[in-house]
Image (cartoon, rainbow, N blue to C red):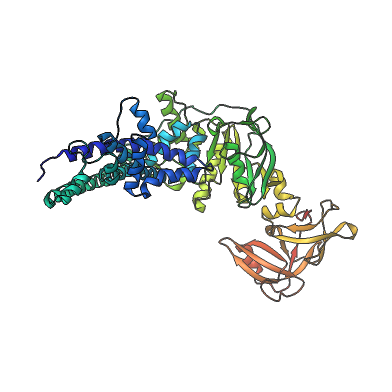
């Protein structure tokens, strides 16, 4: 069928060399473009993709102009007695140029698919940019990169127009399979053309099938390896060692400003080794504070200092990279490296020079402390959500951070699991000697975990102090609302040291001193007292407007003095346990409620 099989070897040689070159160039270009946000990005990307959209003959013409006798590179190479045109080197160059866009775009897509929190997590664990690439980005992108390399090889193997322009059709030197097909057809040898067509289709199809098989078998091998290792460690009790974090005098100072899309973040606070809860509605700027502390985001101005080390100072132009800040970060989605085992995840942040025995000791200690015996050789996808959360916490603590940042760590968990892990976290933090910041919009969660609170609203701290003070005596309407108070009325100072609740239509006795800036009075729903003693102070008749039921409590909506006109016509809402409700609901109206003077909240 074939009089000369040199087109096969020339095609394979040029395609493999071109694929090897585009493999490295494509990865380098893609990884660089991933982080480049300059004004020339669109132009650079257009240049990279141009060979993919231009006709091959145009690409060949441009290369001929560049490498030809009077071209810039052609003249330069001629000074060294090197000629490119009409040689197999030219075939390699054209194959590289036309295959590069496929490799570049596929690699870029693979890198872009990686969860950005995985990269951030690696940096917070002290990894250099090279380590981040080699241990996180490249392994996670390798399936896409291999697919891109296969596409690049197939494109290089099938290149015709540009190769004909620059390398020509010299049998035994530059004639590739596509050229052999073209000139066989032109010469009337259809049988030979069919033969070469089947060869090139067979090579391309074999490559694609091999890549698909590799990707499928890779996943199956990992799954099987994890199951075998799980079985081999089921009955193995990990030793509990005396390894623990060093005790340090923890002190954090933050004074930062950052322009955001909807408001400006402007906050100043300090903290010691007691957990500080950042409480506020979603979008208040809580998570942005953590990101600025970790170096993930850069404030526009201000200063961040941790244990005497300046992490950021806009005036002195200091901005330590994330890897040097010694800050552990627990992300909302945990950001566990999916291609590494649990043990490898926990050990990721340990210094490279750490002896292997010490690495094993640290991993085993963290696993034991988190009640994850036998999980060291499993992969993240083989664990439950609660187990993944504990692994992420263990990984953050294993690197011995001076500060631990927890960004809504329970948001992805169900109620039962959240309660269990909350107790685990409280226990863990009680032994942690560093600074802890805990972000949450769940007020009960923040109250249980933290001793002190910083309440945020639209980028500004509107309250700070002990959780007892903030919950019991909020100073403003916004703080009271964020801490769960549901009953408010506009207020005025009345005679005889009383407060007039204008929206409720009552005068109230209070024990708290009355400020001249008084604007609101409030009381929490669970602190409203149902009574039969109608003559006591702050006791008023009421009627039921509607009810709302939860598994353990009833919320009753009440209107003072008169019957409501409709279900939304009410002044106050009170919460009672269902046992109390069973006794209450049978009473005749009006009911009587008492607003305890010691429980009334006066706000500005």
Q: Residue at x 12, y 40 (%)?
A: 4
Asked whether 268 or 359 is in front, the reply is 268
Q: Is residue 265 left or right of residue 396?
A: right
Q: Is residue 197 above or below residue 347?
A: below
Asked whether 97 or 563 is in front, the reply is 97
Number of on-image labels: 0
Asked whether 490 or 299 is in front, the reply is 299
Question: Measured from the top left, where is residue 513 in percent x and y?
Answer: 84, 51
Quarter where residue 387 is shown: top left
Q: Residue at x 31, y 43 (%)?
A: 152
Residue, far right: 496
Q: Is residue 61 left or right of residue 424?
A: left
Residue, far front: 70
Q: Is residue 212 left or right of residue 136?
A: left
Question: Measured from the top left, where is residue 553 in percent x and y?
Answer: 60, 61
Q: Is residue 541 above or below residue 271?
A: below
């Amino acid at each position: 069928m074939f009089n000369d099989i040199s087109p096969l070897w020339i095609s394979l040689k040029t395609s493999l060399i071109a694929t090897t070159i585009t493999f490295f160039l494509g990865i380098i270009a893609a990884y660089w473009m991933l982080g480049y946000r300059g004004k020339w990005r669109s132009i650079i990307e257009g240049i990279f993709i141009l060979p993919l959209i231009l006709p091959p003959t145009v690409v060949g013409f441009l290369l001929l102009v560049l490498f030809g006798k009077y071209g810039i590179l052609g003249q330069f190479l001629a000074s060294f007695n090197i000629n490119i045109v009409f040689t197999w080197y030219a075939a390699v160059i054209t194959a590289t140029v036309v295959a590069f866009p496929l490799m570049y775009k596929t690699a870029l897509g693979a890198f872009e698919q990686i969860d950005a929190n995985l990269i951030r997590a690696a940096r917070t664990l002290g990894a250099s940019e090279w380590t981040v690439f080699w241990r996180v980005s490249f392994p996670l992108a390798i399936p896409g990169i291999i697919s891109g390399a296969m596409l690049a090889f197939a494109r290089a193997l099938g290149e015709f127009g540009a190769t004909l322009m620059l390398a020509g059709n010299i049998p035994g030197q530059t004639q590739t399979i596509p050229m052999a097909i073209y000139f066989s057809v032109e010469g009337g040898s259809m049988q030979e053309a069919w033969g070469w067509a089947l060869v090139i289709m067979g090579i391309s199809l074999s490559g694609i099938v091999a890549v698909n098989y590799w990707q499928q078998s890779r996943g199956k091998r990992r799954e099987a390896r994890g199951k075998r290792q799980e079985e081999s460690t089921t009955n193995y009790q990990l030793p509990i060692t005396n390894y623990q974090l060093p005790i340090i005098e923890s002190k954090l100072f933050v004074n930062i400003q950052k322009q955001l899309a909807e408001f400006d973040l402007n906050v100043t606070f300090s903290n010691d080794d007691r957990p500080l809860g950042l409480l506020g509605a979603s979008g208040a700027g809580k998570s942005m504070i953590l990101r600025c502390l970790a170096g993930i985001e850069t404030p526009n101005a201000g200063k961040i200092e941790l244990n005497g080390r300046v992490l950021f100072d806009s005036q002195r132009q200091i901005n330590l990279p994330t890897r040097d800040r010694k800050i552990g970060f627990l992300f909302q989605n945990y950001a566990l490296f999916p291609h590494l085992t649990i043990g490898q995840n926990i050990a990721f942040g340990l210094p490279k020079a750490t002896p292997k025995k010490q690495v094993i000791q640290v991993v085993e200690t963290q696993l034991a402390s988190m009640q994850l015996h036998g999980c060291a050789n499993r992969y993240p996808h083989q664990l439950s959500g609660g187990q993944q959360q504990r692994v992420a916490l263990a990984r953050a603590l294993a690197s011995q951070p001076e500060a631990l940042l927890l960004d809504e760590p329970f948001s992805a968990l169900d109620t039962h699991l959240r309660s269990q892990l909350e107790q685990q976290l409280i226990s863990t933090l009680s032994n942690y000697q560093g600074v802890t910041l805990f972000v949450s919009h769940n007020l009960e969660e923040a109250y249980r975990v933290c001793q002190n609170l910083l309440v945020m609203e639209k980028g500004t701290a509107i309250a700070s102090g002990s959780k007892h003070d903030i919950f019991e005596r909020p100073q403003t309407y916004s703080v009271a609302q964020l801490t769960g108070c549901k009953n408010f009325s506009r207020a005025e100072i009345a005679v005889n040291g009383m407060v007039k609740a204008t929206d409720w239509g009552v005068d109230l006795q209070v024990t708290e001193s009355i400020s001249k800036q008084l604007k609101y009075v409030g009381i929490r729903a669970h602190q409203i007292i149902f009574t039969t003693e109608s003559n006591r102070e702050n006791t008023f008749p009421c009627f039921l407007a509607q009810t709302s039921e939860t598994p353990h409590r009833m919320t009753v909506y009440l209107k003072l003095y008169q019957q409501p006109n409709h279900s939304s016509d009410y002044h106050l809402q009170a919460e009672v346990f269902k046992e109390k409700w069973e006794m209450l609901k049978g009473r005749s109206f009006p009911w009587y409620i008492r607003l305890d003077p010691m429980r009334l909240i006066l706000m500005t």
